Image: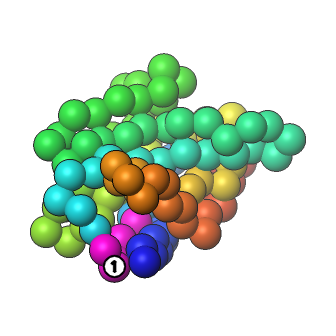
Amino acid sequence: QVQLVESGGGLVQAGGSLRLSCAASGSIFSINVMGWYRQALGKQRELVAVITSTGIINYADSVKGRFTISRDNAKNTVYLQMNSLKFEDTAVYYCNLHQRGPGDYWGQGTQVTVSS
């Protein structure tokens, strides 16, 4: 079994920064994809950024140039540095781990609220 524990959400003013962390534990494969998704109130869950175990990264267009995803493979931890936050970044942010075979695992979600 796999557990994902997120931390780092909160309330911040527009233009501010936050850093999210997600630590994975359990049966973790050496090859996987970790990332962040978000779901705003009344909207579908959407991809924010993902990073493979070999360092390949993909960002949503809406966060390019503002958010940076990184990971520490030794710690099975993924980070999301969010700068220049906007009101529209307000959402519940979910950590995701994708492994071929078992599929997807999700964290419990952490609220990010950006005040305008």
x and y, in percent, of residue 62 in the image: 53, 24
x and y, in percent, of residue 24 in the image: 35, 71
What residue is rendered at 25% in x and 43% in y?
A: 52
What residue is rendered at 35% in x and 30% in y?
A: 58
The secondary element bearing badge 1 is classed as: strand
Q: Where, by quadrant of the figure, is residue 54 drawn? A: top left
x and y, in percent, of residue 98 in the image: 40, 51
Residue 50, relative to residue 65: is it above or below? below
Q: Would you say 87 lies left or right of 70 here?
A: right
Residues 87 and 58: in front is 58
Q: Look at label 1 and name its amino acid.
A: Gly
x and y, in percent, of residue 59 in the image: 40, 29
**Disc 1 designates what residue?**
26
Residue 34 shows in the view: no
What residue is rendered at 28% in x and 68% in y?
A: 28
What residue is rendered at 37% in x and 40% in y?
A: 50
> Could you tell me which quadrant the C terminus lies in?
top right
18 in the magenta segment? no
Which residue range is magenta in the image? 22-27
> Could you tell me which quadrant the N terminus lies in?
bottom left
